[in-house]
Amino acid sequence: MKRNLVLLALCQGLFLTNNITFIAINGLVGFSMAPLSWLATLPVMGYVVGSALATAPVARVQKWLGRKPSFLIGIVVAILSSLLCLYAAINKNFFLLITATFIAGFYQANAQLYRFAAAELAAPGDKEKAVSWVLAGGLMGAILGPNIAAVTKDWFETPFAGSYLALTVVGGLAALVMSVIRFPSQSTQPGPLTQTSRPLHEIVRQPVFIVSAMGAGLGYGVMNLLMASTPLAMQACGHPFQDAAFVLQWHVIGMFAPGFFTGHLIKKFGALRVMAAGIVLNLLCITIALSGSDLHQFLIALFALGLGWNFLFTASTTLSMSSFRPEEKDKAQGAINFCVFFVMAMTSFGSGALITTQGWTWLNLGSLVPMIIMAMGLVWFTHQVKSSHAQHPS
């Protein structure tokens, strides 16, 4: 099982290599081709909308075929969509680029389930650590993603065309690694203790589901809002692309390096306290970002943003596992990922519109709203838990 977890963490790293490269270059490629500047991040939005709409089909594929075939199909889609992005960039076809990133969303919808698959590969008492360790595999994406974008930027006459070509190689490696992972068999035969699967509307009405979906969705949304606009903001402030790639690299290190210990923190302090720490780190990011636009301010702000995302997302994922039964996992996990991608879709478009019309300052001020909502959600859920304990003392 440890071998399979290591290999799954490697797949997570290769997925994040693809993901971060997409984030680093799609806004800039879109900006060079968009008919209006505020449409620059539509390719990023296409990626996220594609992911959101793919959550339901992916859930069905996972239920019918199992984890591994679904994950491999997602990787094949990643390779094909990268080739389509390459063609769109060379031919300067903005709308084809959006279509290609939309298709690539099927890969992301699959790969966002790696963290849940990790819990299935671990012993019951080690689920928090397994989720955290596999997410830590994203460190590979932190190192490779921005560097791939920077190194391959000028391989061809069309800027970043080489980056899309490099992503096909990344996809090939991911397929090779995924093909040797052994996942537990997912028998659909009901056992003597199997309970009837509840309808989705009943699952999502639970306070624990609501707050975990909020944590994952709003945490990812704020991170995406600021990360997707950072290359454009730094370009507007006169920083070269190499600086933006460096900032994104440390941002992604902040996202995934804590994965080696976040599971321990959740086990020691509980998911809610770790989520609260994530909110504080997001507020710290916004404060630093509002203080100026020098390289070190972008760097520290985005690093804090990465740490805050890790705490919120990992703790939310762990918390969500108490909201559904094993036989309900496909639809429940799909619903959580839909919430994540829905918020990301709005922030992907909003980042381009805000950064090109209102600027970096208003973008950060707007990020305060979801963090305030998340804080209120944690307070509400804590009150719900205390009320439940008072009515049903153990």
Image (cartoon, rainbow, N blue to C red):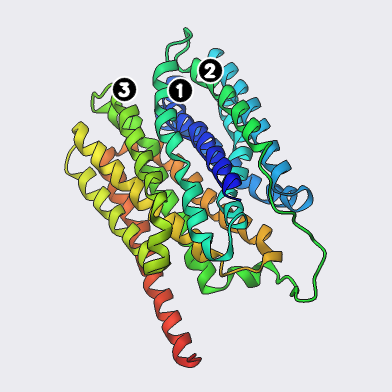
* Visible residue check, residue 329: yes
Residue situated in front as seen by the camera: 387 or 365 = 387
Image coordinates for residue 314, horizontal then vertical, percent: 45, 56
Residue 290 drawn at (x, y percent): 21, 45
Upstream in the sequence, badge 2 or badge 1?
1
- The residue lying furthest to the front in this view is 2
**Mark before the other along the chain sequence, 1 or 3:** 1
Q: Amino acid at mark 2?
A: Ala
Q: Above or below — where is 116 with respect to 166? A: below
Q: Nearer the viewer, residue 96 or 269?
A: 269
Residue sitting at 32 percent across and 61 percent down? 277
Residue 89, label in figure: 2
Left or right, 77 with respect to 65, comes to left
Query: Given contact means CB atoms under 8 Å apart, are the residues at marks 2 and 1 in contact?
Result: yes
Looking at the image, which is closer to me, 220 or 116?
116
Disc 3 versus disc 2: distance between alpha carbons?
20 Å
N-terminal label among 3 and 2: 2
Q: CA distance from mark 2 to mark 1?
A: 7 Å
Q: Residue at x 58, y 40 (%)?
A: 7
Q: Residue furthest top?
A: 157
The answer to whether the residues at label 1 and label 3 have Cβ atoms under 8 Å apart is: no
Number of residues whose C-alpha sits closer than 10 Å to that of mark 2, classed few (under 14), some (14–19) or many (20 or more): many
Q: Secondary structure at mark 1?
A: helix
Q: Is residue 323 left or right of residue 68?
A: left
Label 1, on which residue? 29
Q: Which mark is residue 242?
A: 3
